[in-house]
Image (cartoon, rainbow, N blue to C red):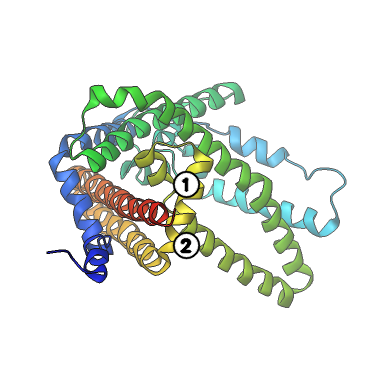
Amino acid sequence: MNRTAPEARAATQPAGVIDSLQAGFNTLNRNVWLLILPIAVDLIIWLGPQISVGMLADRLLANATPPPGVDTAVTRSIDELRRSALQDLSQDGGLTQYDLLKLLAVPVTGLGLPSFAAARPSEGTPIAVDSIEAATAVALASILVGLCVAALFYGLLAQAVREGRAIPHRFMLDFAAIWIWLIALMALILGVGLGVLLPLVLVVAAVVGVAPGIGGVFASVGLAIAIWAVVYLFFTTSALFVSRVPPLTAVQRSMDVVRHNFWSALFFTAAFALISTGLPMVWHVLANALRTPGTILGIVGNDYILAGLAAGSMEFYKERAAALRAAQSNHR
């Protein structure tokens, strides 16, 4: 007996947010050996040599001056940021104690591996590099290696989402392209951040200094735009790994999926943010209380949860991208 149109639509309805998360963890459980990669990187960050810039960052910031030709308000904002950075450096070691190997997790950009150790003090032998060239080489090598391992981990995880299990020798055909795309995506993020967002922050800071009321309005508008961007671009990495497309195409597909599934995408993004920022607090409490056993538990638990969330976002994207393609095919 043929199904009615509503029944057919219901049969092709994508899974809900909770079901997508559950499917992601189920996929990870079937391929749990993939956790070897983030756990190994966490152990290197935790127990490997602690490579820091020593007093190099302190000296560079102390000698930094605003660029010529910048108006007074912006100059004051830059100088305040410089003084704030110097104060941060003097508290608890700041950047002078920062372990450059933590860049293996490619923090801040959201493109790196799940990592618990990157937010913890390193316990390896301290090694200070005192030249810009050496620090740059270590930082760049750490980021590129980190992105390489991230491409391998998330690429295999995406293969498991698409096909049910990760098969390394088959994934190797896609690995080089995905690694290059991941590097390009990071360059795009940094370019937008430094070329667009940083100047806007400096302008808003200057406006706040001159007219606090107007600056507050600008800040609120900026926050609303930032939240909008986070939601619409949230599935960019899922699109890159699951659909195996370059960064700009991945951005477009993420925006398409969110535009056609806005409220469920918003709910998923909020749930992801809540879990990924809340649970690490528990792991840190355990690590502080139990020391070595707690740190090991934190590494395993944190990497498992964040990997499961990543797989869940891939499941969410995969089903909705497939439904969107089907709908577009039906309209042709």
Q: Does the rendering let one see residue 67?
A: yes
Q: Does the rendering let one see residue 50?
A: no
Near mark 1 (Cα within 10 A), the count class, few <14, some 14-19 or many ≥20, is few
Q: Residue at x 40, y 31 (%)?
A: 146
The tag on residue 108 is 1
Q: Splitting the image into 4 quarters, where does residue 243 fall?
A: top left
Q: What distance separates the C-alpha of mark 1 from that of mark 2?
A: 25 Å
Of the two numbered discs 1 and 2 in the rendering, the one whose residue sits closer to the viewer: 2
| Quadrant where the N terminus is found in the figure | bottom left
Name the amino acid type tagged 1: Val
**Secondary structure at numbered mark 2:** helix
Near mark 2 (Cα within 10 A), the count class, few <14, some 14-19 or many ≥20, is few
Question: 256 or 49, which is in the foreground?
Answer: 256
The tag on residue 153 is none
Name the amino acid type tagged 2: Arg
Q: Residue furthest right?
A: 69
Confirm or deny contact between disc 1 and disc 2 (CB under 8 A).
Answer: no
305 w.r.t. 7: above or below:
above
Question: 299 or 236, which is in the foreground?
Answer: 236
Q: Give residue 7's position: percent from left, percent from top.
A: 21, 68
Q: Residue at x 46, y 35 (%)?
A: 182
Q: Give residue 172's position: percent from left, percent from top.
A: 31, 23
Instruction: Specify which label sits upstream in the sequence, 1 or 2.
Output: 1
Q: Splitting the image into 4 quarters, where does residue 269 fall?
A: bottom left
Q: Residue at x 73, y 74 (%)?
A: 214
Q: Give residue 60's position: percent from left, percent from top.
A: 66, 36
**Secondary structure at numbered mark 1:** loop
289 lies left or right of 158? left
Q: Residue at x 32, y 28 (%)?
A: 48
7 lies left or right of 99? left
133 w.r.t. 149: above or below:
above
Residue that mark 2 sits on: 259
